[in-house]
Every structure is written in C-alpha cells, then in structure tokens.
Amino acid sequence: MPHRVTQLLKVLIPLTLGILIIYFLYRKTDFDELWSSIKETNWWILAFSLIFGLSGNVIRGLRWNLLIKPLGYHPKVSHLIYAVLGNYAVNFAIPRAGEIWRCGVITKKEKIPFAKLIGTLLIDRLFDMLMVILFIIVAFTLNFNVFYKNRHEFNLPQIFTSSGLYLGIVILIALCIAVLVFFKETRMVKKIRNFFISMWKDMLLVWKMKEKTRFIFYSFGIWISYFLYFYVTFYAFGFTTHLGIAAGLFVFTLGSVSMGIPSNGGLGPWQAAVVFGLCAFRINIEQAKAFATVVFGVQSIWMILCGLFGIAMLSIKKGNNHLVKIVN
C-alpha cells in the first residue's frame, strides 16, 4: 500500500503542479485574442519543425550506443533509438519514469545489466546539463546589450539592481567553500563531494573513449536539433518572425531550464518560461500565450506519437524473435 501511494503521488504531484501553473498563467487570458493569434498559425512550418525534434532524439540513441560499447556490449542501434523515443512518451504519463523505462526495456532486449545502463544514463544527463549551461552562457552573452540598454523598462525589483545582491552571492559561495573544507567529514558533505567526484570520473570516461570526437559531435547535434525544433516555429507566427537567433536562443534556453521541473512533458513550467521569454522581447502577452499553446500542443502530440511508434517497434521485434524461436 505505501508503495502504491508513493507511485500515485509521483503522478499526481507533477500533474497538479503543471495544472496550477497553467491556471495562473491563463486565468486572465483574453481567449478571443488568443484564438485570433492561433488562427494565423502557419501549420506547414510547424510540421517542418517536427523533423528536427525527431532527428535530435535519433542522434541521442546513437550517442547512447557510444556510451554502452565501452562496457563490452553491442546492442542494436535501432533498439536504442526506439527506446529513446519511447522514453519521451512515458515521461508524459509519469515524469522522469521514461529514463528508467528505457534502461529496463534495453536490459530485457539486449541482456545488458540494468545498473550499467543507469550509469550510462547519468553520463548522458551530465552532458545534457553541460550543453544547457553552454547555451545559457551563449544566450545571455548575445542578448546582453539588448537587456542592458532596456534594463530600466523591465521594472525589475530593486534587489536585482543592488550591489548588495552580488556581494551576498560572493559571501554565499565563500561559505559553501568553507563548509566543504572545514566540515568535509560530515555525511552531507561526503555525499556532495562523492557526487562531484562521480561526475568527474564520468567525464574522464568519455575523455578516454575511443570515439570521443563522435560523442562530442553527437552532443552538439542533439542540442542544435532541439534548438532548430524550437526556433523554426518562430516563422509560423507573424508576431515572432522578426525575432532573430539571439532571441530564439534566449527563449529556448528558458524553456530547456524549465524542463528540469518535474511535470508531464513540461506541461506548465515550459509554457510559463516561454511566455516570459517572449514578453522580454516585447511580444504581446496574449500572442506569447498563443505561441506557447500551439507549439507545446503540436510538439507534445508529435513526441507521444513518435514514442508510441518506438514502443510498438520494440514490441513487434520482440514478437518476431519469439516466432523465430518457435519455428526453429
């Protein structure tokens, strides 16, 4: 019973959070204006953008193969790609469960120990985090002049323009370093230290990899595909076509960071982040909501369909294997 309650909470809490964010985001919406913006959508451009979402996930499957091969296993690449696609469909039902599912399904199909696959998944996510950090740095660098010139129009609370905030950040960093140095034997500090040591070992593992150049190429390929998956949609709406790549990078980065909040496929946090990002570039809030609504809806349906296709292909292949055994 406690296990069932835990599983139920894992579904209900993220879903409730997403619905609450959607409610507060849309509660004062002028739905006539929202619908007017949605009707002007160029659906052909949206359909074209979907190619990049699929290609990014296919490349992720190829990159995963590079992480598994050094362990001494040689799974079918098609299985890995189908598992990655299915991963995202599962995440819409139960946030974060997709990663565990894809490791489990490959364990069954390829007879690779589950613990080893989880290790490769951690490296996979570590490099995703590094890529997001890189995108954040590039996005804020490219948009620094825009935000600096218009800083007085953003009506930021005084705390964000106060030197005390930045002094406080420096003091906080100094305190964290002091805790790590003078309390290094405490249980919590040991866990934190072990976490960073594990991250460093994972990075060294990739560095020693024979195909590290291809791994890095795939890593950039994944995130450039994801960026194009998002940025191309700017051309599907008249009110965002004038926004350049720098603005696209900024809004894309906000959306990527929001995906770190557990929710069903990003429901709630993603829309809020994208609306905020578009409004920072003076897009009307109703138009920003229309953009977030359409893009999230279309891309979510696409991810689910691709995921169901991946799950179906894995099931069909499994059925075919059984049939071969029976005939033999």
Image (tube, rainbow, N blue to C red):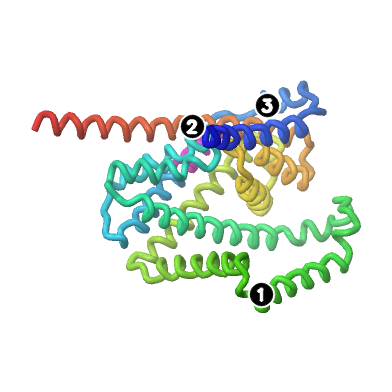
Element type at mark 3: helix
* Nearer-N-terminus badge (3/1): 3
Residue 314 seen anywhere in this rendered image of the structure:
yes
Residue 293 appears at what percent x and percent y?
66, 31
On the image, numbered disc 1 is attached to which residue? 183
> Which residues make up the magenta segment?
45-54
Residue 237 appears at what percent x and percent y?
66, 34
Residue 29 appears at what percent x and percent y?
79, 27
Q: Is residue 48 above or below residue 188?
A: above
On the image, numbered disc 3 is attached to which residue? 38
Give the residue type that dot 2 points to.
Ile
Residue 75 appears at what percent x and percent y?
28, 49
Disc 3 residue crowd, few under 14, some 14–19, many 20+, Cα 10 Å: some
On the image, numbered disc 2 is attached to which residue? 304
Give the residue type that dot 1 points to.
Phe
Q: What distance separates the C-alpha of mark 2 from that of mark 3?
A: 22 Å
Task: Identify which residue is drawn at 33% across, 46% down.
Answer: 107
Disc 2 residue crowd, few under 14, some 14–19, many 20+, Cα 10 Å: many
Camera-side residue of 157 and 110: 110
State the count of labels.
3
Disc 1 residue crowd, few under 14, some 14–19, many 20+, Cα 10 Å: few
